[in-house]
Amino acid sequence: MTEAGVSRISVGVQTLEPAAANGLGRRLTSPDELATIRSSWNGALSADLIHAAPGETVSGLLHGIDLLVDLGFDHLSVYGLGVEPGTRLAHRVASGEVVAPVPEDGWRSIVARIGSHGLRRYEVSNFARPGAECRHNLAYWRGDGYLGLGPSAVSTLELDSGVVRLTQPTDHAAYFARRSFFDCDHEVLGASEQRLERLLLGLRTFHGVDLASIGSSLDDRARARLDLAVGREIDGGLLRADGSTIYPTERGLDLLDRVVAGLAAAF
């Protein structure tokens, strides 16, 4: 794979606790399997973990973090569990078969444990050693164009008609019955949509957002509303500023949905 340019393998671990794997309805990944991956791959390693899964304990998740870092994983993604309506997990939660923990429980301990290993929180749910950040995901958050292939894949491309977002069919049969790559749902993103996405996605990362580049394309009233909204979040300790660039604080990352809702209302 290295000859093809692959530099990192990402492993969907989700959990190393048997009870949590059962709660999620997933096969458990074992430490021995992870050690085998490590011994047979000399490149970088990333792992996805789920926080607040049914059957999970904070101590178990912290132990899993320690194990992964000890094995040489230099990038961790820790996503809060979302129980989607209509799924088997939603039915199990609704029936009382499993109980999902409160998402906030233990989160600060998790962030602190990852940081103690030298991995920096560079995005809401992503942590990496300096230089090991995921360039693929950073492209999304910077607003770069990207190509998505396969059923349900999303692409954002700059074409003659403007910046276009393409969403492929989720159904496999419909996907393979397409007449061309562009035979799918699509929308042209106007200037206002692009500005809003650049602001909201950029605030997910440690790079922040250059407010001057966004505000320069707004009229005076919209710019004043945005400046006022940003000032409120800075006063509330959720954003900080360095010149014209604004960044989320650590607490701001934890409450980013609230921050971006307030800023979006200014548009």
Image: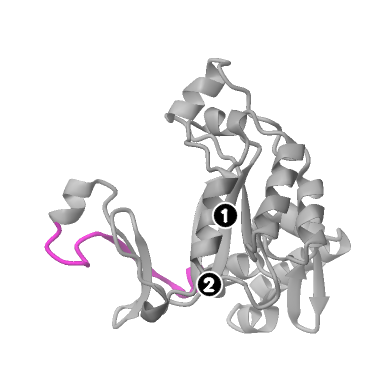
Of residue 234 and residue 25, the one placed in the foreground of this image is: 25
| Crowd rating for badge 2 (residues with CA inside 10 Å; few <14, some 14–19, many 20+) | some
Q: Find residue 64 and report its horizontal and vertical position in percent.
A: 68, 46
Question: What x and y, as percent, mark residue 29?
Answer: 53, 43
Q: Position of 60 compared to 92: left or right?
A: right
* 204 is higher (above) or lower (below) than 27: below
**Screen quadrant of the N terminus:** bottom left
Residue at position x 53%, y 72% in the image: 43
**Residue at 24 percent of width and 59 percent of height:** 184
- From the image, which quarter does the C terminus lie in? bottom right
Q: Which residue is mark 1?
A: 35
x, y percentage for residue 91? 48, 22
Residue at horizontal 78 percent and vertical 41 percent from the top: 106
Residue density around tag 1, few if under 14, some if 14–19, many if 20 or more, within 10 Å: some
The reply to whether discs 2 and 1 touch (Cβ–Cβ < 8 Å) is: no
Q: Secondary structure at mark 1?
A: helix
Residue 13 in the image: above or below residue 218:
above
Q: Quadrant of residue 234?
A: bottom right
Q: Position of residue 9 (x, y in %)?
A: 49, 64
Query: Observer-nearest residue: 46 or 120?
Result: 46
Q: Secondary structure at mark 2?
A: loop
173 relative position to 67: left or right: left
Quadrant in which residue 98 is drawn = top right
Verify whether residue 185 appears in magenta: yes
Q: Is residue 87 above or below residue 260?
A: above
Q: Which range is magenta?
A: 178-194
| Horizontal side, residue 150 vs residue 97: left or right | left
Q: Amino acid at mark 2?
A: Gly
| Residue nearer the viewer, 224 or 4 | 4
Q: CA distance from mark 2 to mark 1?
A: 14 Å
Q: Is residue 98 magenta?
A: no
Q: Mark 2 highlights which residue?
A: 43
